[in-house]
Image (tube, grey):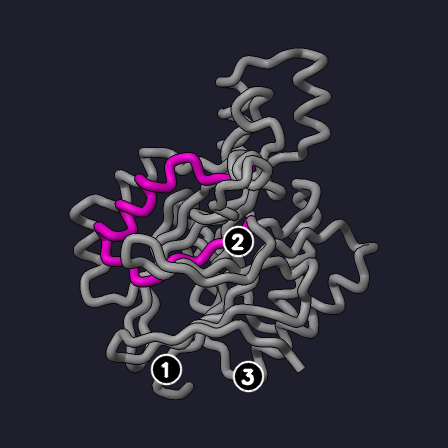
Amino acid sequence: MGEEVKIAHISDLHIAGRGDRRQLQDLDRMLGHFSSSGVDHLVISGDLSDRAKEADWEIVRELLLRHGWYHWGRTTVIPGNHDIINLEEEMRFYNALNPLPGMRHRACTAKAARFCRFFQELVTGDELGDAAFPFIKVLRFPTLKLAIAAFNSVNAWSATDNPLGSRGYIEPSELRAVSSPAVKKALDGCFTLGLCHHALKVYGTDSLLDQAFDWTMELKNRQEFLGVMRDIGAQVVLHGHFHRFQSYTLGGVRFINGGSFRYSPERYSLLEVAGSGEFSQRFVVMS
């Protein structure tokens, strides 16, 4: 490893089963590229599955294992809305039984917890720790202490408030937990990354059509999340969800959208952090 720590970031794989052969070949190739190009840590910011199926998570886990990336110190992964919510099933269940919002919220929370347990080794580093959101990693490299503060931003489906299942919300309890004095002390001296699935910025134009799309995709409590990121001294936040490779700054924090591996399987974000805390970011096209 050189002086700079290299963090590769991909998002929105949207894998649709083992028959999705081209996508799996592309992911296999990308993971091999990360191994050969000196990447130190990989972040996958959600939507591993296209259909909220655990079988798709298993496919990703198998590929990470094959390439030596299935390790706490090498990879961090969080869920996206497509990992937790199957829109067709939600609508069918709603129309048949009209479940109470509290039931849907509990089901969504339970599925996110199941995702955490499924990828437990990447969350806690062992089989004994409590795998849950939010979680904090502190990775020690020769020149740098890198911290990752990871959140679940998937919001339960609602016929009125989240009809496409794509609006995001981070539970206030998660935000409070990361803002605690104990966590701040643990992050002292670290280069800190925030991590969630949903974007803080989508289109953000005056167009009514764009605004309607923004509403369906937004992180509802984005200002509160931004406030916590500033409070803990996060320099960068990685996310996905909106299938666009982009980098933007809000409130002094750099946000990097990992785009969509599904639609651009040769492209990824590379963040390079020096021991001084200086960093650079670029979108790389794999040759």
Q: Residue at x 71, y 28 (%)?
A: 89
Q: Does residue 42 lie above or below 239 as drawn? A: below
Q: Residues within 10 Å of mark 1 (few under 14, many from 20)?
A: many
Q: Residue at x 29, y 53 (%)?
A: 251
Horizontal and vertical percent for residue 119? 53, 52
In contact (CB < 8 Å): disc 1 and disc 3: no
Q: Which residue is mark 2?
A: 240
Q: Residue at x 36, y 55 (%)?
A: 194
Q: Nearer the viewer, mark 1 or mark 2?
A: 2
In contact (CB < 8 Å): disc 1 and disc 2: no
The residues colored magenta run 216-241
| Amino acid type at mark 3 | Ser
Viewer-proximal residue among 135 and 166: 166
Whether residue 198 appears in this view of the structure is no
Q: Which residue is mark 3?
A: 37
Secondary structure at badge 3 equals: loop
Q: Which residue is mark 1?
A: 4
Q: CA distance from mark 3 to mark 2?
A: 23 Å
| Amino acid type at mark 2 | Gly
Mark 3 and mark 2 lie on one chain; the one further toward the N terminus is 3
Toward the front, the furthest residue is 206
* Quarter residue 29 falls in: bottom right
Q: Does residue 132 lie above or below 275 as drawn? A: above
Viewer-proximal residue among 85 and 218: 218
